[in-house]
Image (tube, helix red, strand yellow):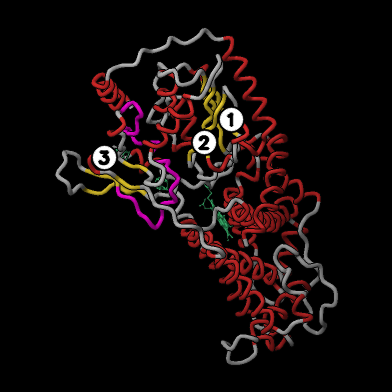
C-alpha cells in the first residue's frame, strides 16, 4: 500500500504549506489533528450533558423534549444541540484526516503499529456514538436509522429473534428500549475515552490540547454555524409510515445507503474486511527492521535525559546491577524504540571532543553511531573551501540535500535533527571545521519523530539539557525548518546565511592540541554538558 503514500504526501505537503502561510505553523490545523479530535470530544461531552438534562426517554417524549430545546430554548438548548452535532461531525472529520496524514507520513508501520491499530476500535466507537445519537432524537431520520441498523444487526447470528420487528409497529416499541439506547449513548463515549487513552500509551507527552488560537477559532466557527444553521429534527417518527426521503449525515451514516443494494451480511463482510485491511496496513509491507538504541553501562550515569527526551517512552530508568555508584541506568524497550537517535542527542556523554576510541556515549544507535557522525563531519569539512564554509545538518525526513554539495557547502544527514548532540555544533565551529552551521529538517510543528524540532531549539536556546555552550557564536548558526519540502526557500535561506557569514570577522583559527590535551577537553565538556 506504500504506493499510495507519495501522492498523498505531496497533497498534504501542499496543503500544509498553504495553511502555514495563512495561519502560521503554530495554528496550522493539520499539525493538531489529534488534539482537535480531543477538543471536539470535550465539546461533545459538555453539550451532551446539557442536552441530557432536558432529554426525556420515551417514544413520544424523546422527540418532544428535543423539540423543546431546539425551538423554545434555541438561545442555549438549541445552540448546545447544534454544538453537539457539529463537534461530532468535526471529530469524525479530524479523525479521517488525522488517519490519512499519519498514513501519508509513514508513521504507522514498524514499532508505531500499536497507535495505528488501536485507532481502528476508535473508528468503530465513534461511529457507534453517532448512530445511537441520531437514533435518540426519534424523528424520521432516527426511524430510518433504527430500522436500517436493526435489520443490519439481524444479519448477525447473535439475537434470538429479529430486533427489527420492534420497529415495525408502535405496539412492540417500548420506552425501555430508549432507556437502553440512552445508556449506550453514554457508555460508548466513555469506552471511547478509555481506548483513546490506550491509543496514546506509546507516545510520550501526547499533544491533546490544540493551540489556544486554534481552539478559540474552531469553537467560534462552530458557534457561528450553530446560529446560522441550527441542528433540527426531521419531523416525528411515525411507525405507521416508512420514511421515504431523509437527510442523511454523511459523516456518520455513509454506509447506510449501501443497505438498499446489499444484504446486511454483505455489508458486515464489507466493513469487517475493510477494518481488517486497514488494521493490517502496518505490515503491508512490514518496515525493514533496524537496530534499536543500545545503552553502554560504562558510560551511563543514570541522568535520565534520554528517558525524558524519548518521544515514544522507550527508555525507562531501572535500578543498576553493575555495581557503579549511580542508582539507575537507562534501559531501552526494543519493542517500542523507533531508532530515531534522539536519546543519543540528549546524552551528556555524546560529545565529539572525546578522542576517537572514546566516543562511546551512554546510549547510541548501533547502525549510525556518533563516532561515525564525527568522522563524517570531519571528512565533509576537510573538502570545504572559501570564507563561507557551511555545514548543513539535515534530518533523514527533511529530504535529500545532495544538491547542496558545492565547494563551500556540504550536507550531513542524521536520523532526526535532535539526534545531533549540541556539542557537535560547538565542535564544528570551535575546531574551525566550518564558518557556519545550518540546521534543517521537517517543517516546523511537523517533526516526523515528534520532538526533534522542539528539543533542538530548546537545547540551542539553553532551555533544555544538554545546552549548547554559551561560547558558541549564535550568529554562526542558522535554523530553517522546511528542509527539502520547501527547496527554493531553503536555498534562499542558505544564500542569506552565507551573505551574513561573509560580513562577520574571520574566526580565530585554533591550533591543534596534543592528544593528552584533547582528553582534558573531553572531561571538561562532559562536565559542562
Ligand atoms: C477521535 C479520534 C482520535 C484522536 C482524538 C486521536 C488522537 C491522537 C493524538 C493526540 C495523537 C498524538 C499526537 C502527537 O502528540 O504527536 C495521535 C497519534 C496517532 N494516531 Fe490518533 N487519534 C484518533 C484516531 C486515530 C485513528 C482512527 C487512527 C488510525 C487508524 C489514528 C492513528 C494515529 C497514529 C498512527 C498516530 C501517530 C503515532 C506516532 O507518532 O507514532 N488515530 N492520535
Ligand atoms: S542520557 Fe546517557 S547518561 Fe543519561 S541516563 Fe541516558 S544513557 Fe545514561
Ligand atoms: S532511538 Fe532513543 S529516543 Fe528514539 S525511540 Fe529509541 S530509545 Fe527513544
481 and 509: which is toward the camera: 509
Q: Quadrant of residue 119?
A: bottom right
Which residue is pictured at 65% across the width and 74% down the height?
Answer: 271
Mark 3 residue element:
loop
Residue 340 in the magenta stretch? The answer is yes
Q: Are marks 3 and 2 in contact (CB under 8 Å)?
A: no
Q: Quadrant of residue 488?
A: top right
Mark 1 residue element:
loop
Q: Which residue is mark 1?
A: 405
Tag shown at residue 286: none
Which residue is pictured at 20% across the width and 42% down the height?
Answer: 327
Which residue is pictured at 54% across the width and 32% down the height?
Answer: 411
Q: Which residue is mark 2?
A: 453
- Give the image location of residue 284, x and y in percent: 56, 65
Q: In this picture, is 264 found above or below 434?
A: below
Q: Is residue 211 visible?
A: no
Q: In this picture, is 25 found above or below 96?
A: above
Tag shown at residue 300: 3
Query: How far is the residue under mark 3 from the one under mark 2?
Result: 25 Å
- Give the image location of residue 26, x and y in percent: 61, 36
Which quarter of the rendering shows the N terminus? bottom right
Mark 2 residue element:
helix
263 and 132: which is toward the camera: 263
Q: Nearer the viewer, mark 3 or mark 2?
A: 3
- Give the image location of residue 454, x and y in percent: 50, 35
Indicate yes or no: mark 3 CB to ligand 2 under 8 Å.
Answer: yes
Q: In this picture, is 484 found above or below 235?
A: above
The magenta span reads 331-354
Q: Tell how many labels.
A: 3
Q: Is residue 10 visible?
A: yes
Q: Residues within 10 Å of mark 2 (few under 14, many from 20)?
A: many
Which quarter of the rendering shows the C terminus? top left
Amino acid at each position: 500500500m506504500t504506493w499510495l503514500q507519495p501522492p498523498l504526501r505531496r497533497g498534504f505537503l501542499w496543503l500544509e504549506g498553504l495553511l502555514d502561510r495563512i495561519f502560521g505553523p503554530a495554528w496550522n490545523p493539520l499539525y493538531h489533528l489529534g488534539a482537535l479530535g480531543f477538543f471536539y470530544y470535550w465539546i461533545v461531552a459538555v453539550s451532551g450533558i446539557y442536552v441530557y438534562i432536558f432529554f426525556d426517554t420515551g417514544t413520544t417524549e424523546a422527540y418532544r423534549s428535543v423539540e423543546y430545546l431546539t425551538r423554545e430554548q434555541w438561545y442555549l438548548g438549541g445552540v448546545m444541540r447544534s454544538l453537539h452535532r457539529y463537534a461530532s461531525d468535526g471529530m469524525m472529520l479530524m479523525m479521517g484526516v488525522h488517519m490519512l496524514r499519519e498514513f501519508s507520513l509513514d508513521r504507522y508501520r514498524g514499532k508505531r503499529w500499536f497507535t495505528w491499530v488501536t485507532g481502528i476500535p476508535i473508528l468503530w466507537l465513534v461511529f457507534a456514538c453517532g448512530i445511537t445519537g441520531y437514533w435518540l432524537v426519534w424523528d424520521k431520520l432516527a426511524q430510518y436509522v433504527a430500522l436500517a441498523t436493526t435489520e443490519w444487526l439481524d444479519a448477525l447470528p447473535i439475537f434470538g429473534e429479529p430486533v427489527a420487528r420492534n420497529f415495525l409497529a408502535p405496539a412492540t416499541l417500548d420506552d425501555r428500549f430508549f432507556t437502553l439506547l440512552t445508556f449506550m449513548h453514554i457508555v460508548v463515549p466513555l469506552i471511547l475515552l478509555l481506548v483513546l487513552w490506550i491509543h496514546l500509551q506509546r507516545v510520550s507527552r501526547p499533544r491533546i490540547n490544540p493551540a489556544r488560537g486554534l481552539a478559540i477559532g474552531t469553537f467560534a466557527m462552530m458557534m457561528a454555524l450553530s446560529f446560522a444553521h441550527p441542528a433540527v429534527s426531521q419531523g416525528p417518527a411515525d411507525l405507521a409510515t416508512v420514511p421515504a426521503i431523509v437527510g442523511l449525515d454523511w459523516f456518520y451514516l455513509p454506509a447506510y445507503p449501501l443497505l438498499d443494494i446489499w444484504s446486511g451480511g454483505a455489508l458486515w463482510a464489507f466493513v469487517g474486511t475493510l477494518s481488517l485491511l486497514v488494521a493490517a496496513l502496518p505490515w503491508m509491507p512490514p518496515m525493514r527492521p533496524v537496530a534499536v538504541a543500545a545503552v553502554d553501562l560504562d558510560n551511563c550515569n543514570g541522568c535520565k535525559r534520554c528517558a525524558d527526551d524519548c518521544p515514544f517512552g522507550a527508555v525507562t530508568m531501572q535500578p543498576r546491577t553493575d555495581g557503579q555508584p549511580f542508582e539507575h541506568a537507562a534501559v531501552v524497550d526494543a519493542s517500542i524504540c523507533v531508532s530515531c537517535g534522539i536519546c543519543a542527542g540528549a546524552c551528556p556523554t555524546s560529545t565529539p571532543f572525546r578522542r576517537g576510541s572514546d566516543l562511546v556515549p551512554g546510549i547510541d544507535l548501533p547502525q549510525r553511531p556518533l563516532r561515525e557522525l564525527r568522522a563524517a563531519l570531519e571528512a565533509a569539512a576537510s573538502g570545504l573551501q572559501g570564507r563561507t564554509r557551511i555545514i548543513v545538518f539535515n534530518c533523514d525526513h527533511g529530504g535529500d540535500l545532495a544538491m547542496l554539495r558545492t565547494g563551500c557547502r556540504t550536507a550531513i544527514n542524521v536520523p532526526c535533527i535532535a539526534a545531533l548532540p549540541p556539542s557537535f555544533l560547538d565542535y564544528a565551529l570551535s575546531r574551525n571545521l566550518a564558518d557556519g552551521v545550518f540546521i534543517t529538517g521537517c517543517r516546523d510543528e511537523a517533526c516526523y519523530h515528534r520532538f526533534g524540532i522542539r528539543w533542538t531549539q530548546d537545547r540551542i536556546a539553553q532551555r533544555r539539557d544538554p545546552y549548547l555552550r554559551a561560547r558558541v557564536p549564535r550568529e554562526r548558526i542558522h535554523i530553517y525548518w522546511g528542509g527539502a519540502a520547501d527547496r527554493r526557500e531553503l536555498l534562499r535561506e542558505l544564500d542569506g546565511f552565507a551573505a551574513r557569514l561573509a560580513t562577520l570577522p574571520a574566526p580565530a583559527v585554533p591550533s591543534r592540541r596534543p592528544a593528552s590535551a584533547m582528553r582534558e577537553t573531553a572531561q571538561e565538556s562532559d562536565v559542562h554538558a
